[in-house]
Image: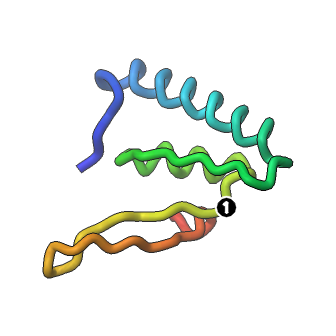
Amino acid sequence: MPTYIAGFGQQRIHITSTIYHCMISIVQSRSEQRNFQLIIITHDEDFIELLGRSETVEHFYKVSKDNNAHSKITKLCISKLN
């Protein structure tokens, strides 16, 4: 179940777009810094796809639960979405 930042429709799209542009700006400005790491926690798969289109983000980690309710962390390639 996705968790949205605000409202529905156009308002959500605007906020997602604004945050997306801010995140991409941060990633691009720090891309030459070897020890830079940015952690984004989201339930919004559309937002992850937007980050993937930037060509600056290559992978992400998906946290899910297994049948025993243990957390499972999987590294996924953004290009594999869709």
Mark 1 sits on what residue?
58
How does the figure colour the protein chain or chains?
Answer: rainbow
Identify residue type, mark 1.
Glu
Whole-percent x and y of residue 34?
79, 55
Residue drawn at the location 40% of the way across and 45% of the way down = 42
SS category of the residue bearing label 1: loop
Residue drawn at the location 63% of the way across and 65% of the way down = 79
Residue drawn at the location 49% of the way across and 45% of the way down = 40
Q: Is residue 52 above or below residue 79?
A: above
Q: Residue placed farthest to the left in the image?
A: 68
Query: Toward which corner of the image does residue 64 lie, by quadrant?
Result: bottom left
Using residue 67 as the reference point, say whether residue 46 is left or right of it: right
Whole-percent x and y of residue 4?
32, 34
Using residue 37 as the reference point, say whether residue 4 is left or right of it: left
Query: Toward which corner of the image does residue 25 lie, by quadrant?
Result: top right
Query: Toward which corner of the image does residue 27 lie, by quadrant?
Result: top right
Using residue 51 as the reference point, say whether residue 11 is left or right of it: left
Label 1: how many Cα within 10 Å (few below 14, some 14–19, many 20+) = few
Whole-percent x and y of residue 10?
41, 21
Tell me how many marks there are.
1
Using residue 59 as the reference point, say whether residue 28 is left or right of it: right
Residue drawn at the location 77% of the way across and 41% of the way down = 30
Q: Is residue 53 above or below residue 66?
A: above
Q: Residue placed farthest to the bottom in the image?
A: 67
Q: Is residue 22 above or below residue 48?
A: above
Whole-percent x and y of residue 69?
15, 73
Q: Residue placed farthest to the top in the image?
A: 11
Q: Residue placed farthest to the front in the image?
A: 35
